[in-house]
């Protein structure tokens, strides 16, 4: 009888030469994806191919959650507020595309989460008041008429307020004169 040869052992990593980044990172991507519910990481890594370029530009998958019964999962997509209504109309077709990637009816529902384009931390809305627009200059004759109207008032702050009110009324009357007659 012939001697049995030793079982085949693959060469060590250095003997194989260069490896693609997907092979090197495959384990870490799978582990991170499984922590977020993605049993098949292809949904994450090939989202543009699965959903199509136009839909992939509007949203991205962030989580898959499974119900207690295990019948169908919920895919959560992150999108901007403006793209939400357009994406909502395309959800049935998108669900079919994602299920085609899995090979069975794995996704039962798709939920949209809408946020700012760059997330909450980076793109926060400004809550400072807007700068006031420059007021147009009031004609000198209107200022003189307003000062004459409030001249009999002895309290300075009340006189100033009455002058501003008179300026506003006289300016409006001058601008609308002849329009409503």
Image (spheres, rainbow, N blue to C red):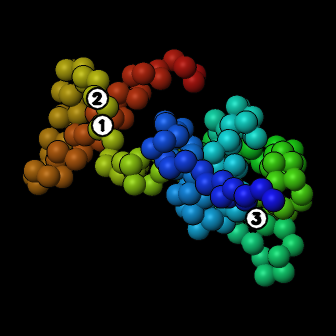
Q: Nearer the viewer, residue 118 or 134?
A: 118
- Report helix, strand or loop for mark 1: loop
- Report helix, strand or loop for mark 2: loop
Give the residue drawn at x 87%, y 73%: 71
Q: Can you say whether 30 is above or below 165 in the image?
A: below
Image position, residue 143 (x, y; %): 20, 28
Image position, residue 50 (x, y; %): 76, 41
Classed neighbour count for the residue bearing mark 1: other residues with Cα under 10 Å, few (<14), some (14–19), many (≥20): few
Q: Which residue is mark 1?
A: 132
Give the residue drawn at x 18%, y 52%: 158
Say which quadrant the C terminus sits in.
top right
Residue 76 visible in rendering: no
User: Quick check: 41 left or right of 180?
Assistant: right
Classed neighbour count for the residue bearing mark 3: other residues with Cα under 10 Å, few (<14), some (14–19), many (≥20): some
Furthest-front residue in this view = 1
Q: Which residue is mark 3?
A: 74
Q: Nearer the viewer, residue 130 or 42?
A: 42
- Report helix, strand or loop for mark 3: strand
User: Quick check: 45 left or right of 18?
Assistant: right
Give the residue drawn at x 33%, y 35%: 168
Q: Which residue is mark 2?
A: 135
Image position, residue 37 (x, y; %): 66, 66
Give the residue drawn at x 24%, y 45%: 162
User: Quick check: 67 left or right of 158?
Assistant: right
Q: Quadrant of residue 47?
A: top right
């Amino acid at each position: 009888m012939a001697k049995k040869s030793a079982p085949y052992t693959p060469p060590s990593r250095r003997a194989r030469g260069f490896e693609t980044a997907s092979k090197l990172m495959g384990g870490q991507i799978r582990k991170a994806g499984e922590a977020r519910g993605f049993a098949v990481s292809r949904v994450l890594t090939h989202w543009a191919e699965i959903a199509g370029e136009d839909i992939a530009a509007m949203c991205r998958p962030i989580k898959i959650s499974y119900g207690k019964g295990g019948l169908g999962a919920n895919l959560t997509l992150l999108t901007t507020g403006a793209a939400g209504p357009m994406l909502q109309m395309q959800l049935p077709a998108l669900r079919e595309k994602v299920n085609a990637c899995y090979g069975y009816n794995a996704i039962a529902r798709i939920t949209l989460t809408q946020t700012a384009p760059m997330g909450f931390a980076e793109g926060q809305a400004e809550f400072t008041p807007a700068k006031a627009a420059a007021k147009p200059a009031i004609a000198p004759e209107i200022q003189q008429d307003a000062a004459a109207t409030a001249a009999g008032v002895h309290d300075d702050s009340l006189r100033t307020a009455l002058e501003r009110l008179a300026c506003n009324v006289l300016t409006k009357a001058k601008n609308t004169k002849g329009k409503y007659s």
